[in-house]
Image (spheres, rainbow, N blue to C red):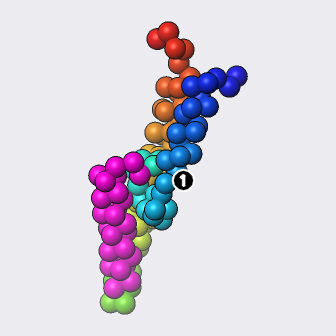
Amino acid sequence: MITRSKLVEQLRDYQIRSQHKCPALTVFSPKPSLSSWIDVAVAIFLALLFGVLLLSSYITLYLRHYWISLVIICLAIFLPVSLRISRQNLAKKKERRSMLPLSM
């Protein structure tokens, strides 16, 4: 059943998503939306960390240290995957919270 509060929440989420100036940073954000400067700073830091991991894996491949490169590539893959899982968990918690009755 669609309630008024759920519609308001969806509208607010849509408005927040439509205000994104850097949609590429949302990939590296641990939250579903970039709502504050702290979220943007964390996303920029994680994006730079991802870039450093990729660069260091290329350097270790060039120097023929294959095992070290494999570990670094695995860390670089694990970073966006773990951020996506945390965004999904936060979205589920937010949805569960909105499903509570108004009397609580």
Is residue 96 or residue 60 the one in the foreground?
Answer: 96
Q: Position of residue 90 (x, y in %)?
A: 46, 39
The reply to whether residue 72 is in sight is: no
Amino acid type of the residue that numbered disc 1 sits on in the rendered structure:
Ser
**SS category of the residue bearing label 1:** helix
Is 8 within the magenta?
no
Is residue 14 or residue 76 the one in the foreground?
Answer: 14
Q: Which residues are magenta?
A: 34-59
Residue at figure coordinates x 57%, y 25% from the top left = 5
Residue 68 lies in quadrant: bottom left
Q: Residues within 10 Å of mark 1 (few under 14, many from 20)?
A: few
Is residue 87 or residue 9 the one in the foreground?
Answer: 9
Q: Position of residue 50 (x, y in %)?
A: 37, 68
Residue at figure coordinates x 30%, y 58% from the top left = 41
Q: Position of residue 6 (x, y in %)?
A: 59, 29
Q: Quadrant of the N terminus?
A: top right
Is residue 64 or residue 88 the one in the foreground?
Answer: 88
Residue at far right of view: 1
Dot 1 corresponds to which residue? 18
Residue at figure coordinates x 49%, y 62% from the top left = 23
Q: Main secondary structure of the magenta part?
A: helix
Residue 92 placement, left or right of 71: right
Is 48 within the magenta?
yes
Residue 2 lies in quadrant: top right
